[in-house]
Amino acid sequence: MRRKVLIAFLALCVVWIVGVVVWVAVRLLTPPPPDPWEDEERKAGMHHEQHHESERYYIPDSYRTEKDGSVVLRYKLLGSIDSGVGDFRRTYDLDDRPKKTGPTEETYTDRVGGMRRTITFVYPSSFDPDDVDEAAARVTVRAVPE
């Protein structure tokens, strides 16, 4: 009787170990799913793979595709050397200076991959115009099909 119980226990342990090995192999060999906002980023020309020189990227706070095919991405920049307007512009190759469209707002417009892209930087009311590179801002990227 004891021998049968021992054999059954060892068989159960082997089955459990094989199951764990298979589970680990599946987890390691299955690629992770894409981030849900990747399609919108690619359409708007904001995906990190589209900017190879930069090893940095920003993750949008919100994103959506509208019925007309336009894409809207929203980012929040905290305001520092690592998360400011200057770093955002360098990361996404925004070389031209944006146009001032309000006391605390600037807009940058260009064309990327068949989309007309408008990037709006909205600064807090305590914005110092002499310190744009390290400024905090809410950034809205709207890409509309041409």
Image: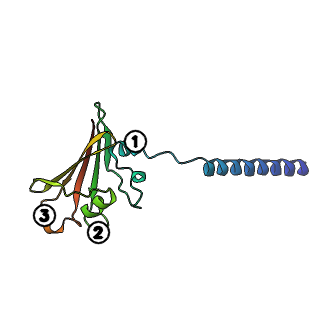
Residue 145's place in the image compared with 17, above or below, is above
- List x then y, in percent, for residue 14: 79, 50
Tag 3 or tag 1, which sits nearer the N-term? Answer: 1
Badge 2 amino acid: Ile
- Crowding near pointer 2: few (<14 within 10 Å), some, many (20+)? few
Q: Nearer the viewer, residue 79 or 133?
A: 133
> Looking at the image, which residue is at 69% across and 50% down?
20
Badge 1 amino acid: Asp
Q: Residue furthest top?
A: 67
Q: Are marks 2 and 3 in contact (CB under 8 Å)?
A: no
Question: Which residue bears the numbered disc 3?
Answer: 126
Question: Which residue bears the numbered disc 1?
Answer: 39
Badge 3 amino acid: Ser
Element assignment for label 3: loop
- Crowding near pointer 1: few (<14 within 10 Å), some, many (20+)? some
> Looking at the image, which residue is at 33% across and 59% down?
91
Element assignment for label 2: loop
Residue 7's place in the image compared with 87, above or below, is above
Q: Is residue 128 visible?
A: no
> Looking at the image, which residue is at 70% across and 51% down?
21
Question: Which residue bears the numbered disc 2?
Answer: 81
Q: Nearer the viewer, mark 1 or mark 3?
A: 1
- List x then y, in percent, for residue 42: 38, 45
